[in-house]
Image (tube, rainbow, N blue to C red):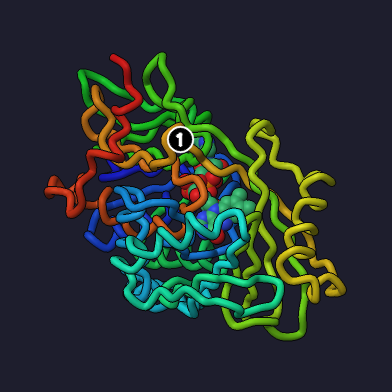
Amino acid sequence: MADVVVVGAGVIGLATAWHLAGASLSVSVLDAGPLGGQSSHAAAGILGPLVESRDDGPRTRLLWESSAAFPGWIDALREDSAIDPEFEPTGILRQVAAAERADLESSLGWRRQYSPEVEWLEDADPAWPAAIWSPHEGQIRGPSYVAALAQAAATRGVDIRLGEPVRRIRVGRGRVEGVDTPRQSLAARHVVLAAGAWAGALLPEAEPLPVLPIRGQALALKATRPPFPHVVFGPAGYLAPKRDGLVVVGATEDADAGFDARVTLAGIAALSDVVRVMSPELLPLPFDGAWAGLRPATPDGRPLIGPWPGADGLIIAAGHYRNGLLLSPITARLVGELIRGEAPSLDLAPFRPERFHRR
Ligand SMILES: Cc1cc2nc3c(=O)[nH]c(=O)nc-3n(C[C@H](O)[C@H](O)[C@H](O)COP(=O)(O)OP(=O)(O)OC[C@H]3O[C@@H](n4cnc5c(N)ncnc54)[C@H](O)[C@@H]3O)c2cc1C
């Protein structure tokens, strides 16, 4: 019997598995498809706890605390995987449009409570009369991060089984017993449900969790070197320059695409507009491809992290929406604390899955 079976080999499942294996637990990860084959592979890699927040609240605190864990997390990941996920804590510039100026200027107070060095810039660029400079945010490279987590987990002895869909989470007498796949039944003391946008449908309940897919499309341009040293955010998207000169342009939010993860012409047009408005000098760069992924969203925008009522040993780690890479270290840590029976190091009340459980 495994100590833990993790359902889903995206960044949340892999980060959790790697972390748990570091605490000497035996861990198996099952995924229906390839590694990080869904949302995680599509991610631009931005680690933006403040740029991704509109106000102060439990979600912003969760994002910030996870971001603060990144330097040590990446050091350990590099050591266990020998893969460099290109962690760049170079800061993020947020271009401010006239219509959002008053709102963003009045948000400086709470932003500076997290990072006193956040600056309001005037006349930094003729096209953008105002901007916010936030020096303690940054980025990684999404696909390398997925590969590093998988390798690091394998180094710690995690058994990763791909192409192995979980059909059912088995529960008996109020306790999780394991999972069933078309090929086998696996017994486990704990099951971590980290199946991204598919998490809702897998619960052993008639009433599924409201995790909804929100498609995000992104594209890449290829420069010979990074055109600027940091990520730039604008009102409708972002530009994330990678070390080798690739510039990731993201991302659409397609709420009505369901589970269709294909790229559309409308998506490409919207992303081209992001470049035209934010940095038109990039328009002549060669196009280097486009992709899409299904972000796991929840109705209140907060992830689901915590035990599932009615099945001891079943823990949900899903619904990370636009910030799954950023939230992977803290999610892994909190799930680890729950499995080891320790008091959570952060108040889990705002993230408890049972907030959507009517019975
Ligand atoms: C275009 C785009 C850009 C993004 N940019 C960023 C960014 O810059 N920074 C950031 O932090 N986040 C970003 N995100 C969000 C981030 O990608 C997600 O929040 C994150 O990947 C969610 O990870 P996950 O492991 O929960 O889900 P996923 O990566 O979707 O993984 C879930 C896994 O579960 C598996 N699964 C499903 N059903 C079953 C089953 N029955 N049995 C077994 N396995 C199953 C799937 O095959 C999948 O591999 C972006 C997303 C998109 C789409």
- Left or right: residue 127 versus residue 49 is right
Q: Residue at x 50, y 70 (%)?
A: 132
Quarter holding residue 188: top left
Q: Position of residue 29 (x, y in %)?
A: 42, 47
Check disc 1: other Cα within 10 Å, few if <14, some if 14-19, many if 20+.
many
**Is 148 in front, or is 27?**
148
Q: Position of residue 37 (x, y in %)?
A: 60, 50
Q: Residue at x 64, y 75 (%)?
A: 241
Give the labeled residue for mark 1: 298
Quarter placement of the C terminus: top left
Quarter holding residue 77: bottom left
- Left or right: residue 27 versus residue 166 is left
| Residue 44 seen | yes
Whether ligand 1 has any atom under 8 Å from the Cβ at mark 1 is answered as no
**Is 224 in front, or is 102?**
102
Q: Is residue 38 above or below residue 138?
A: above
- Left or right: residue 352 versus residue 165 is left
* Number of numbered labels in the structure image: 1
Q: Residue at x 30, y 48 (%)?
A: 58
Q: Position of residue 324 (x, y in %)?
A: 46, 52
Q: Is residue 241 above or below residue 271?
A: below
Give the secondary structure at mark 1.
loop
Q: Residue at x 25, y 54 (%)?
A: 25
Quarter placement of the N terminus: top left
Q: Is residue 221 above or below residue 330?
A: below
Kind of residue at badge 1: Thr
